[in-house]
Amino acid sequence: MQTIEQLTQADQSAWAVLKTWFKQTRNHFEILSADKKVAGKDLFSLQISVRSPMGAVIYETGGILINHGWLRILGSGSPKLNRGLLEWNFGKTFQESGEQPSYLLVADDVLGGYFGLNAGGLGPNVGKIYYYSPQKEEWQDLNLSYSEFLGWALNADLMAFYQGFYWQNWQADVQNLDGNQVYRFEPELSHAAKMDDRSKQAVAIERHFEATFNVKDKYGVAYSVS
């Protein structure tokens, strides 16, 4: 076990490199302020060093909002994105402290899509990012490392990746959405329909995750938006 001091040595941090990336981005982004006390505890629990891009993001940010908040990359948590990477994964990808997760949830989007760093539980491509598509309702291998995923989020043509899933005035809706919420659509995204023909409702992402991965009747009478 490395100490917090060993894991957070500033002269070895990947943050210096990431800061150069932020100066050359294609997509709108917002870096949220980190809670260093929480971030340090998270790095210690996960045994991730700031030498890695993931460790640097956790330690230096409360999260990163991409495309006006359409895509949320998890850090240590902040008022706008009030869930850190460790907190969000606990009870989902691992149940007990010290347990090795089969994947880590590292980001999500307002559609109810999830990005996971595979450690063997999502498919054969270990160390790569997989995307849970709410349209196809399955995990898809993006064949990106975590650092490549960061570069993709900052510079890729997200309009092309999410083609067909934007609606009129989506920017205003997304900017007003809480970082702990996603949209529930009717008809669901797995059914063919134009986005402007769907109704949408902001729901708690915790409940959405539970409904997506653990509940057979996804939106039964007990479903709540709180």
Image (cartoon, grey):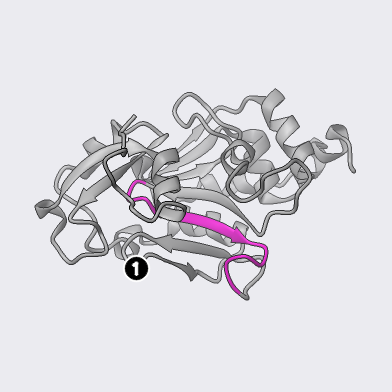
Q: Is residue 221 magenta?
A: no
The image quadrant of residue 180 is top left
Identify residue type, mark 1: Lys
Please state if 95 lies on the left or on the right of 80 as rendered: right
**How many numbered callouts?**
1
Q: Position of residue 188 (x, y in %)?
A: 23, 56
Instruction: Tell me the residue at 41%/34% (across/down).
Output: 179
Q: Secondary structure at mark 1?
A: loop
Residue 210 percent across, percent down from the top left: 45, 46
The residue lying at 61 percent from left, 36 percent from top is 87
Identify the residue at horizontal 55%, vertical 57% (top origin). 116
The answer to which image quadrant residue 146 occupies is bottom right
**Residue 62, image x and y in percent?**
56, 32
Residue 203 percent location from the top left of the image: 32, 37
Identify the residue position indicated by label 1 in the image. Answer: 136
Provide the residue span drawn in magenta. Answer: 110-123
In percent of the image, x 44 and y 61: which residue is there? 132
